[in-house]
């Protein structure tokens, strides 16, 4: 491809799994496959911006060929294996604070009850607030080591705030047994301390702190089902990832580890 062609075609943004290779940046505009909920989601994102939340892309338009255009948010995004700069305590605390800002603003934006929001990663208990549900490192934009924006709201669905935080904790603490964590994360991360830091950054209330370890176990089970469904559908990306990361034995080990850590996590959150 010539330099001229690269300019015409745009820059392919790397990262993620579902839309890998399909997200294109052209200057200040990002174009990507539109989720089925795009019309309602665009309205929701615009409403968040109107209420003062600047930590998400602004929708521009939907194209005739099933894609969406959004504003590009400049900054750094951590890709696996995750670098140490993204796993500092300061970065972790800022992720919690950013998610809290999203939730505080979302309380003022009504969720359209007529929309069939995706259930794959959604809170099984439901809720009245639209959760992001996929606050993983690849979906958080940083500047100067601080989280400033969330991208990729494709899995957004109504749920509880503590559910969204539990999903984020899975990736950022991370809520993984040491063998699983070593695949993509820096070594020697203190899980109980980091879970407390994330909760502190979010400003999590005492009652929700008591609930969080159990909700993390629930969220992990939901993620396992999500992977199982993708594998059953023959998705090559998830089949390969499952194979490379230890198969179902990894998930069994992870779930057993979470149960064993519950008391320690609960104690750390109550400090």
Image (spheres, rainbow, N blue to C red):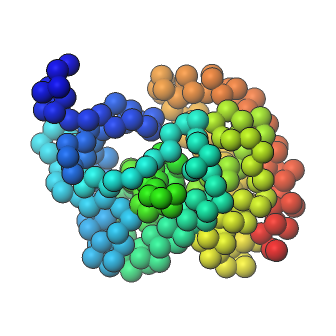
Q: Residue furthest front?
A: 144
Rendered residue at 82%/43% (across/down) = 256
Residue 100 on image: x %, y %: 52, 72
Q: Quadrant of residue 43?
A: bottom left
Residue at screen point 62% across, 46% down: 84
Q: Residue at x 58, y 35 (%)?
A: 81
Please give left or right for residue 184 compared with residue 116 in the image.
right
Residue 211 seen: no
Question: Is residue 150 visible in this depiction of the protein?
Answer: yes
Q: Residue at x 25, y 55 (%)?
A: 71
Q: Residue furthest top?
A: 1
Q: Is residue 252 above or below residue 115?
A: above
- Placement of 126 over or under 12, stated as above or below: below
Name the image quarter holding the N terminus: top left
Q: Is residue 110 left or right of residue 64?
A: right
Q: Nearer the viewer, residue 241 or 129?
A: 241
Between 96 and 206, the one nearer to me in the picture: 96
Q: In screen coordinates, is 7 left or right of 138?
A: left
Numbered label tally = 0
Q: Is residue 42 above or below residue 3?
A: below
The quadrant of the image that shows the C terminus is bottom right
Where does the image place residue 162, in percent across and percent down from the top left?
61, 67
Task: Provide residue 57's location: percent of width, then percent of height.
Answer: 31, 59
Task: Residue 207: give x, y in percent of width and height.
Answer: 72, 78
């Amino acid at each position: 491809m010539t330099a001229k062609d690269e300019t015409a075609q745009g820059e392919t943004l790397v990262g993620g799994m579902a839309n890998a290779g399909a997200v294109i940046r052209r200057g200040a505009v990002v174009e990507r496959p539109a989720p089925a909920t795009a019309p309602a989601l665009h309205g929701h994102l615009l409403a968040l911006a109107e209420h003062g939340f600047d930590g998400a892309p602004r929708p521009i338009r939907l194209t005739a060929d099933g894609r969406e255009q959004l504003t590009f948010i400049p900054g750094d995004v951590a890709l696996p294996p995750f670098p140490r700069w993204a796993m500092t305590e300061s970065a972790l605390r800022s992720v919690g604070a950013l998610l809290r800002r999203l939730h505080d603003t979302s309380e003022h934006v009504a969720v359209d009850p007529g929309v069939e929001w995706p259930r794959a990663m959604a809170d099984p208990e439901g809720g009245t607030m639209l959760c992001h549900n996929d606050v993983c490192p690849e979906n958080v934009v940083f500047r100067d080591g601080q989280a400033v924006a969330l991208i990729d709201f494709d899995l957004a669905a109504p749920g509880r705030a503590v559910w969204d935080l539990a999903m984020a904790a899975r990736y950022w603490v991370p809520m993984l047994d040491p063998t699983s964590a070593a695949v993509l994360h820096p070594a020697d991360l203190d899980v109980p301390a980091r879970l407390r830091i994330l909760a502190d950054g979010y400003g999590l209330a005492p009652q929700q702190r008591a609930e969080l370890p159990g909700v993390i176990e629930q969220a992990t089970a939901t993620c396992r089902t999500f992977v199982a469904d993708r594998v059953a559908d023959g998705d090559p990306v998830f089949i390969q990832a499952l194979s490379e990361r230890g198969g179902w034995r990894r998930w069994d080990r992870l779930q057993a580890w979470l149960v064993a850590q519950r008391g320690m996590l609960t104690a750390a959150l109550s400090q």
